Image: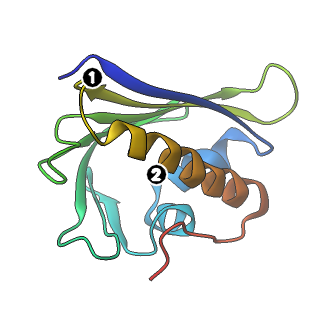
Amino acid sequence: MGEYNILMQFDIDADREPVRDALASESGIRSWWSSRTDGPAEGQLRVSFPDVPQPFEFTVSRDDSERVEWVTGGFPPWWAGTSIRWDLSENPDRPGTRLLFSHRGYEPDNPVIPIVTPAWAQIILRLKGYAETGDSQPFFAF
């Protein structure tokens, strides 16, 4: 596993439980990331995207009130072996949840880093909007 990590912090105007549910349920993930999601069920998550030949594959390695973490399987190959971590805590500055996002384990020279980093920021804003309003707005709706 590589040494490069994408790190971001978001403050969400919602309690921790709705944020965790958005990360840990099929209906939740479908509401902010991709409308074609299978799982997480039995520790497996598959997320489909337009014009991609097969779903992205994840194993859920942790799912509790403080962290949800997914480890990427063999597809896509440029994410293989990386982990996506969502750390949840009370916002110390105001009511709501502080979300610390990390996509960990990239090789520093991985060419997708400059593409994936701003994409995650945009996608997580959809998660934030969904957690705050309950309105489904998947980044990839198809």
Question: Residue lying farthest bottom?
Answer: 142
Q: CA distance from mark 2 to mark 1?
A: 29 Å
**Residue 51 percent location from the top left of the image:** 28, 76
Percent coordinates x, y for residue 3 in the rendering: 27, 16
Labelled disc at residue 24: 2
Q: Secondary structure at mark 1?
A: loop
Judging from the image, the colouring scheme is rainbow
In terms of depth relative to the viewer, which is nearer, 21 or 127?
A: 127
Residue 52: x %, y % from top left: 24, 70
Residue 92 badge: none
Q: How many marks?
A: 2
Q: Pick whichever of labels 2 and 1 is earlier in the sequence.
A: 2
Location of residue 88 in the rendering, given as x and y in whole percent from the top left corner:
59, 31
Q: Is residue 38 left or right of residue 19?
A: left
Say left or right for 126 vs 66.
right
Dot 1: few (<14), some (14–19), or many (≥20) neighbours within 10 Å?
few
Is 139 displayed left or right of 93 in the figure?
A: left
Mark 2 closeness class: few <14, some 14–19, many ≥20 residues within 10 Å: many
Which secondary structure, mark 2?
helix
- Quadrant location of the N terminus in the rendered image: top left
Mark 2 vs mark 1: give the one in front: 1
**Which image quarter holds the C terminus?**
bottom left
Residue lying at 77% horizontally and 54% vertically, measured from the top left: 132
Amino acid, disc 2: Ala
Q: Is residue 52 above or below residue 89?
A: below
- Closer to the camera, 96 or 42? 96
Q: Are marks 2 and 1 in contact (CB under 8 Å)?
A: no
> What's the amino acid at mark 1?
Pro
Picture residue at 69% right of the left edge, 54% below the top: 131
Question: In the rendered image, which residue does mark 1 sit on?
Answer: 108
Residue at point 18%, 69% (across, down): 54
- Position of 6 compared to 108: left or right? right
